[in-house]
Image: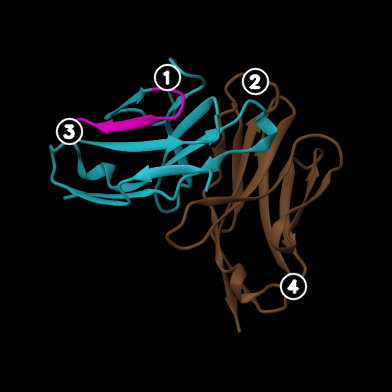
Amino acid sequence: AQSVTQLGSHVSVSEGALVLLRCNYSSSVPPYLFWYVQYPNQGLQLLLKYTTGATLVKGINGFEAEFKKSETSFHLTKPSAHMSDAAEYFCAVTLGGSNDYKLSFGAGTTVTVRA
Amino acid sequence: NAGVTQTPKFQVLKTGQSMTLQCAQDMNHNSMYWYRQDPGMGLRLIYYSASEGTTDKGEVPNGYNVSRLNKREFSLRLESAAPSQTSVYFCASRGQVANYGYTFGSGTRLTVV
């Protein structure tokens, strides 16, 4: 079965600084990987996804993530944090090619941005 | 706007009461899912429906039942609510192509006292 580990439940960054959120996965077959963002009292919004092809994927709001098979990682980055990036971020994995495509989520990382 | 609609948004129940959480999507998606979100645990799958007429258990199904009423609607029922079911519940749907990801509703915040 697939699983996801997000390193760090809370990350605090200064406005304008690099945002780095770590995600490692385990899967016995090629995975599909996703990052979602959740703003307070809202549902989850897709930031970006990796399925096949280019390993560096770009998403909304200036975020990007790189799939590294050798490290089983899919870390999320943004070069310069903005106050509006304060939210909770979830990494998720599903098995490519399976029939039900259930998503498994990490525990989440809460990002706070300091002025 | 196209998307996933959940009702109600908030609910307080007494222990032992029952209720049904409603979910509807208008994107003609085949698959629908119910998750619960608890602090520090991410989202955990309760039940899912890969297609109309089928339902399957997820990671934490105990205490819940589901009904896939038609292609659009997927309801979650708590027959006898317990304080451990206090959580935020999210419904999601997905089209036929897995790499499109899921579309989530805005959630139902349930408190059982």
Question: At which x and y percent is residue A23?
Answer: 66, 49
Q: Are marks 4 and 2 in contact (CB under 8 Å)?
A: no
* Number of marks present in the image shown: 4
Query: Answer yes or no: do the residues labelled 3 and 1 have beta carbons within 8 Å?
Result: no
Q: Mark on residue B55?
A: 1
Q: What span is in magenta? A: B70-79
Q: Return the x and y of residue A22 as percentages of the image width and height.
A: 67, 54
- Badge 2 element: loop
The residue beneath circle 3 is: B80
Do the residues indicated by labels 3 and 4 lie within the same chain of the protein?
no
Q: Is residue A61 left or right of residue B65?
A: right
Same chain assignment for discs 4 and 2: yes
Question: Which label is found at residue A98?
Answer: 2
Q: Mark 4 and mark 2: span between their CA atoms?
A: 37 Å
Q: On residue B74, which mark appears? A: none
Q: Chain of mark 4?
A: A
